[in-house]
Amino acid sequence: MIFVGFLIALVVAISLNTIGNKSGVRLIYVGMGLAVAGGFSNQVEALMLGHVTDFLFFWVPVIGPSSAVANLADIMIVGGLIIIFVVAPFWRRLSLEMALIEREENETRSQSG
């Protein structure tokens, strides 16, 4: 049950990665896939077990010994959101630049062919 969320995230991330054909767009899709799969995994575990099991314990020096607990799904959600918030400001610019490059490549192909 622990790795169900990881497998779901892997399938979703690979699927979304093949949908997006630009590097910046792919990264956004991977972030969304991780966040959605992590949330889905937590929901499935809560429905099946009645609770979500936190099995990773972190020691945070400022707070104390048993201060932070998480599970793989929580890490996927946070990681996915970090990817989205880091890439999102550049997403539109990346998409426009990649569209211009693709247009130039298509024009070059049509002129040479």
Image: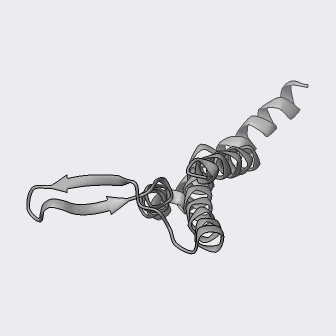
Residue name at image x 57 percent, y 56 percent: 34
Q: Is residue 35 left or right of residue 106?
A: left
Q: Is residue 42 left or right of residue 17?
A: left
Toward the front, the furthest residue is 49
Residue name at image x 40 percent, y 54 percent: 55
Q: Position of residue 46 (x, y in %)?
A: 58, 72
Q: Is residue 84 left or right of residue 11?
A: left
Residue name at image x 59 percent, y 43 percent: 23
Toward the left, the furthest residue is 62
Q: How is the image coloured?
A: one colour
Toward the top, the furthest residue is 112
Q: Position of residue 103 (x, y in %)?
A: 74, 45
- How many marks on residues? 0
Q: Position of residue 22 (x, y in %)?
A: 65, 45
For the residue pair 75 and 64, the one nearer the viewer reads as: 64
Q: Is residue 68 left or right of residue 77?
A: left
Which picture quadrant has residue 92? bottom right
Q: Position of residue 32 (x, y in %)?
A: 59, 61
Toward the right, the furthest residue is 113
